[in-house]
Image (spheres, helix red, strand yellow):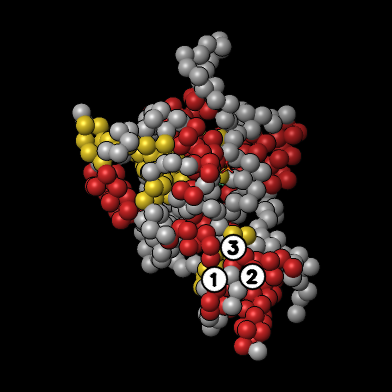
C-alpha cells in the first residue's frame, strides 16, 4: 500500500497541464494585463463548455454576480430570490446591486433551493401592481431569481424556470460551485438568462481568482463587457456615459484558466470517483450519509459532503470534524444559512428548518482532484474508526 501524506487538505488546486506553458507565453510577450489573446480564448472555451453563445471573463465570481444582476435589470430596492444555504458572496452581490435578497430554504433530498417554496412565495406573498410584481409585505418589486447550485449539484431548475416565465422574472444562475454539472442533460450555466462561475483557488478549476458571466443574449453580454471594463464609450478617447467597474480578468490569469479548463472533464470524472468511493465506504455506517445525486442531475461533487446523525453516530458533525483534524484530515462545515447571518438580518425568508439542519449536521471531506484512491480510503477509514470508537465508548 502506498503511504499517505501526514495531512490531507480539504481541496487544493491541481496544476498538471499546460499552465506553465501558457503563463510563460504571457510573461514572455508582456501580455499580462486586462487585454490579450488568452482572455478571448478562455471566453471562447467557456462558450464551448457551457453551450451558451457568449461569455465575459471577470476578476472573480462575486464581481460576475454583481454585474449579472445589473445587466439583468435588477434595480436598487428590488428583491431577488436566492438560496439561503450558500456562500455569502451570493447574497452580498444582491446588496451590491442595491437590491434585497429573499432567502429560500433548501429541499432535504439534494440540499438545493426548494422550488415549492419559490412558488409559495410568488403565489401567496406577491401581487401585481401596475404590471409590477410586488412583495405585498415590503412593497418592493420582485425582479429576479438567483438559484445557487451548491457543492456541484444542480438546483431543480425546470420548475423554477417555469415560475420565472409565469411571473416575468430574470433567472441568474450562481453556478460558482458547479462548473461541469448538468440538469436534465443540459450544462449548468445554460439554463437561466445569465449564469456566473468562479475560478477561485478552491473551485473545480482555478485561475487563482477569476469569474465568468455566460448568456445567450447578445445585448446582455455586450452590456456586461461594457460594465466590467469601466464603461468606456469611445475606443480611443476616455469618455464615459456611466459608472462602470474594473472587473476584467487579467490575461495572465486567463492563461491559467485555458489550461485548467482543458482538464475539466478529467477533474469532474475524478471528483465523482472520490464521491463514489466515500459513498461505498459509508453505506453500512449508521449515522453518516453521503450527499446524493438527483436522478435528473449530473453532480460534480465539487466537495464530497456527509450528513451526520449525531444520535446514531454518537457524536455531532463538529466533534467529528475536530477528531478528523487531529488525525490530519482537513474538513469544513457548510455555511451558516443567510437568513441566520447577522450580515443579512431582516430580509424576507421562507424557512422550513432544512438549511439550519444541514448547517448543523454536514461536513465536507477532502475532495482534491489529486487524491489517490489510498488517500480517500485513509480518510474514509478514519471517519469509520472515529464513529465506531465513539459508539463502543458509549456502550461500555
Ligand atoms: C465561490 C463562490 C462565489 C464567489 O466567487 P469568488 O470568485 O470567490 O468571488 C459565489 N457564489 C458561490 C456559491 C461560491 O461558492
Q: Position of residue 57 (x, y in %)?
A: 54, 36
Q: Quadrant of ligand 1?
A: top right
Residue found 65% across the figure and 89% down from its top: 396
Give the mark nearer the N terminus: 2 vs 1. 1
91 up-or-down from 140: above or below: below
Residues tagged 1 and 3 counted as in contact (Cβ below 8 A): no
Residues at circles 2 and 1 in contact by the CB criterion of under 8 Å: yes
Query: Which one is in front in this view, the residue at disc 2 or the one at disc 3?
Result: 2
Q: Earlier in the sequence, mark 2 or mark 3?
A: 2
Marks 1 and 3, the one that precedes in the sequence: 1
Q: Which residue bears the numbered disc 3?
A: 364
Indicate which disc residue 308 carries: 1
Which mark's residue is nearer the viewer, 1 or 3? 1
Secondary element under disc 3, as helix, strand or loop, is strand
At a point 73% along the width and 45% down the height, the residue shown is: 20
Q: Which mark is residue 66?
A: none
The quarter of the picture where the N terminus appears is: bottom right
- Tell me the residue that label 2 is attached to: 320
- Residue 145: % across, % down: 37, 43
The kind of secondary structure element at disc 1 is: strand
Label 1: few (<14), some (14–19) or many (≥20) C-alpha neighbours in 10 Å: many
Q: Measuring from the top left, give residue 77's x and y in whole percent.
A: 39, 30
Q: Residues within 10 Å of mark 2 (few under 14, many from 20)?
A: many
Q: Residue at x 65, y 48 (%)?
A: 201
CA distance for labels 2 and 3: 11 Å
Amino acid at each position: 500500500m502506498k503511504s499517505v501524506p501526514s495531512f490531507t487538505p480539504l481541496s487544493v488546486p491541481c496544476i498538471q497541464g499546460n499552465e506553465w506553458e501558457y503563463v510563460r507565453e504571457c510573461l514572455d510577450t508582456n501580455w499580462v494585463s486586462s487585454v490579450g489573446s488568452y482572455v478571448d480564448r478562455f471566453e471562447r472555451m467557456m462558450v464551448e463548455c457551457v453551450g451558451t453563445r457568449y461569455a465575459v471573463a471577470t476578476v472573480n465570481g462575486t464581481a460576475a454576480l454583481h454585474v449579472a444582476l445589473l445587466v439583468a435589470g435588477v434595480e436598487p430596492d428590488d428583491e431577488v430570490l436566492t438560496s439561503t444555504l450558500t456562500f455569502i458572496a451570493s447574497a452580498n452581490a444582491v446588496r451590491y446591486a442595491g437590491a434585497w435578497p429573499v432567502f429560500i430554504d433548501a429541499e432535504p433530498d439534494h440540499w438545493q433551493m426548494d422550488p415549492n417554496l419559490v412558488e409559495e412565495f410568488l403565489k401567496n406573498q406577491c401581487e401585481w401592481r401596475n404590471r409590477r410584481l410586488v412583495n405585498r409585505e415590503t412593497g418592493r418589486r420582485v425582479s429576479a431569481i438567483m438559484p445557487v447550485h451548491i457543492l456541484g449539484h444542480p438546483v431543480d431548475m425546470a420548475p423554477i424556470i417555469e415560475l420565472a416565465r409565469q411571473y416575468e422574472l430574470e433567472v441568474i444562475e450562481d453556478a460558482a460551485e458547479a462548473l461541469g454539472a448538468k440538469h436534465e442533460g443540459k450544462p449548468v450555466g445554460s439554463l437561466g438568462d445569465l449564469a456566473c462561475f468562479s475560478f477561485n483557488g478552491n473551485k473545480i478549476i482555478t485561475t487563482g481568482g477569476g469569474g465568468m458571466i455566460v448568456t445567450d443574449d447578445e445585448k446582455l453580454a455586450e452590456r456586461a463587457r461594457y460594465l466590467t471594463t469601466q464603461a468606456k464609450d469611445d475606443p480611443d478617447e476616455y469618455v464615459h456615459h456611466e459608472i462602470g467597474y474594473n472587473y476584467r480578468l487579467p490575461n495572465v490569469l486567463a492563461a491559467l484558466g485555458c489550461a485548467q479548463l482543458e482538464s475539466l472533464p478529467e477533474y469532474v470524472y475524478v471528483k465523482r470517483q472520490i464521491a463514489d468511493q466515500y459513498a461505498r465506504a459509508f453505506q453500512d455506517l449508521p449515522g453518516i450519509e453521503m450527499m446524493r445525486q438527483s436522478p435528473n442531475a449530473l453532480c460534480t461533487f465539487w466537495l464530497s459532503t456527509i450528513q451526520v446523525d449525531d444520535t446514531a453516530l454518537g457524536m455531532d458533525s463538529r466533534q467529528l470534524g475536530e477528531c478528523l483534524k487531529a488525525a490530519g484530515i482537513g474538513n469544513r462545515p457548510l455555511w451558516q444559512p443567510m437568513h441566520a447571518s447577522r450580515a443579512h438580518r431582516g430580509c424576507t425568508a421562507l424557512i422550513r428548518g432544512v438549511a439550519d439542519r444541514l448547517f448543523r449536521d454536514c461536513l465536507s471531506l477532502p475532495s482534491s482532484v489529486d487524491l489517490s484512491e489510498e488517500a480517500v480510503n485513509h480518510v474514509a477509514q478514519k471517519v469509520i474508526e472515529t464513529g465506531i470508537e465513539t459508539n463502543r465508548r458509549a456502550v461500555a
